[in-house]
Image (tube, rainbow, N blue to C red):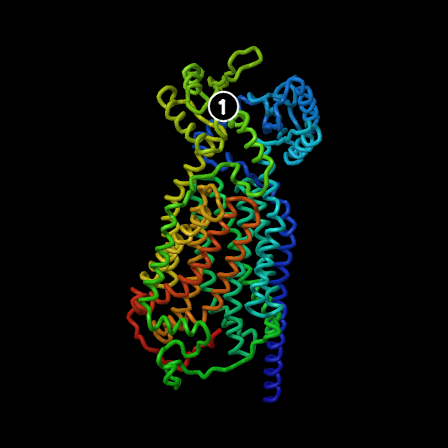
Amino acid sequence: MIDIVINRDKFSEGTDIVKAMWLRILLPLVVVLIWLIAAGFGGPTFGKLDTVSSNDQASFLPASAESTEAGELQEQFRKSDAVPAVIVAESDGEITPQELPSYEEVARALGDVEGLEPPAAGAPAVAGPIPSDDRRAVQYIAFVASDAELGEVVAELRSVLTEQLPDGAVGYVTGPAGFTADLVSAFGGIDGILLGVALGAVFLILLAVYRSVVLPFLVLLTSVFALATSILLVFAFASWDWIQLSGQSQGILSILVIGAATDYALLLVARFREALGEHESKWEAMKVAYRGSVEPIAASGATVILGLLCLLFSDLNSNRSLGPIAAIGIVFSLAAALTLLPALLLIFGRGAFWPLRPKVHPVPATSVAESAPSAAVTAVPGTEQLRGLWKRIAVLISRRPRVLWIASVLVLAAGTLGLTQLQASGVPQSALILAPSNAVDGQDALARHFDAGAGSPVAVVAPKADREAVLGIVGAEPGISEATLTTDPAGGAVVEQGRVLISGTLEYQADSDRAEDVVRSLRTALDDASPDALVGGVTAVAVDTNDTALADLGKIIPIVLAVILVVLMLLLRAVVAPVLLILSVVLSYGTALGASALVFNNLLGFEGADASVPLFGFVFLVALGVDYNIFLMTRVREESLRIGTRPGILRGLGVTGGVITSAGVVLAATFAALGIIPILFLAQIAFIVAFGVLLDTVLVRSLLIPALAYDIGPAIWWPSKLARGSESSRPSGRHRAPPAD
């Protein structure tokens, strides 16, 4: 009877082992399969994002903006939604009356281009040629139908100019249609080139850091699956008009997901490799690694998500939409790093690190304080098991903490002096495209021979009763060469809902600072004469966009700082440490922005910066910069609970130094990849974030924060109990210090 019971127990035990084995085999495979299916649906959607994307600056403004209200009223005076194209033909000599018929032939050839729409019934598809006063250029006006493929129509118009213009003449297609076509072309590399460059850079960095052939592919697979799945949701939201997707938010989404998912993956990989040195079983190693990394990864992701969602308080639709778009990307980055990557690492085990497979090196079950170190080791508690560069940095911090953090602060403060040269009040539309642009060249040609703002007039919608007064004010405004009232074929004023439309031809380029000054002055002049008159048009949109972006900066920065501060307090169970971390990241942001201003103005020769650049730079640098401090300080707190605050600071710095530095380099490289897209905004964001992340990784997290925390000591954890703890090690036979990376 006893034998039967024993045999049954053994059978039951064996069955449980078999079940556990099958569970351990099937669970990772099921997780990978789920992600594979999700990415399979999301991947093909990547090429469709441009169908739900818009780069129309006017649509970025809030409904309350004056130019938005004027634009809505202006639509009532339009007979179609066609996009105007300003066509300029510039000759190398004076155009004689005898040559004009050849330019009329060009007008007829342009009118034959498919996709153009006459401005009115019976009118020609192309108006012109209109000779310039100096007789060295002619101008045409065409309208591209709203349902036509704008890029193809503009390309065909430029082709006609190349083939049909007389010898010695050069043609350009500019205006709203020309600039939109060139802008779409510049964003064309976002779908494939940007992603390829970012992934290639990450792969090379991972290959150099881990010297493993397999691991880089596992990390990149995690990032790509996170991106593909997030794109599926973003595409759906944009299709349902829940969010407004633009080319710049599309590019930032790709870079942010690749960089963030890789950062989270690196932290988990580092803890897994560390645990493999202590445990033979890969499952036990993953339990230890997951338990040690899930809190900082989740906290880091939550910080970035909440920081990005603060953009919902923005009045600019482009900023407000980027918040949830980027937050969706971070959510899937977190999910992939905490589910897909562990499954892949469990499938490959030690083989993921091939050819340098981690070997088990058991550590005696004693604390650092209970061991019998040499005199050289005991000189600096907390550095006993460190080696190489990070041990030297830890020892340096222990000897000169105050000198190091004061010197670091002075270096950062010196960098902030460049903020006085930051020109972030907007740039002309012609400066947005960094690649050669036919539209930009055409705008320059237009300015040389015509009123520079002829293709983009100021539009004033005024009450019918005030039309004479408003017409006189617009015509008398310095910087406006001509004011005209919109009339019908019989010559009478067109009246819609008791309002008239007056167009003012600018003497300056519509996207220039002087044109914006004209709009501001005109609005002031109309306030008394006709309070209900609204000033719109391309220039007014730029004015309102810049003003709204500057207002957003002052409103959103305090909100982001408050949200992140609360997250840090909850995570670290302290007040002093989170406040110091926030101050350090803000100082680092100021330095990055100041240094960037010097580079933009003196090295790259940019005309200025988009008004949204400081806000975007702040959100990304503060949210992402805090990530590295979270990685560092959560480990420091863990070590401080075991061996005391000051030794714990040195120990935490040493064991996280390699992985955090690698993560910073990866994130900087991915954001730097944005620079290949020839759009000024993306190029500036790429430099600011890449430089700021490296600055934060190398100086702030490696020297400033550890040295400052070491100088303050246990008080850094105030008001938690840890602030009243001992400086020395805390012996406990249950704990043992893990080996260094």
Q: In this view, does 96 lie above or below 587?
A: above
Residue 476 at x, y = what percent?
A: 42, 19
Kind of element beneath mark 1: strand
Place residue 724 in its image quadrant.
Answer: bottom left
State whether residue 724 appears in this view: yes
**What kind of residue is marked 1?**
Thr
> On screen, 657 above or below 62?
below
Is residue 91 rendered to the left or right of residue 494? right
Left or right of residue 557: residue 684: right
Q: Name the residue under label 1.
A: 505
> What residue is at 64 percent from the left and 52 percent from the top?
43
Residue 274 percent coordinates (x, y) = 51, 74
| Residue 468: x %, y % from top left | 43, 14
Q: Which of 564 and 213 is in front in this view?
A: 213
Question: Which quadrant, please, contains the N terminus?
Answer: bottom right
In the foreground, 247 or 661: 661
Q: Residue at x 31, y 75 (%)?
A: 727
| Res 720 visible | no
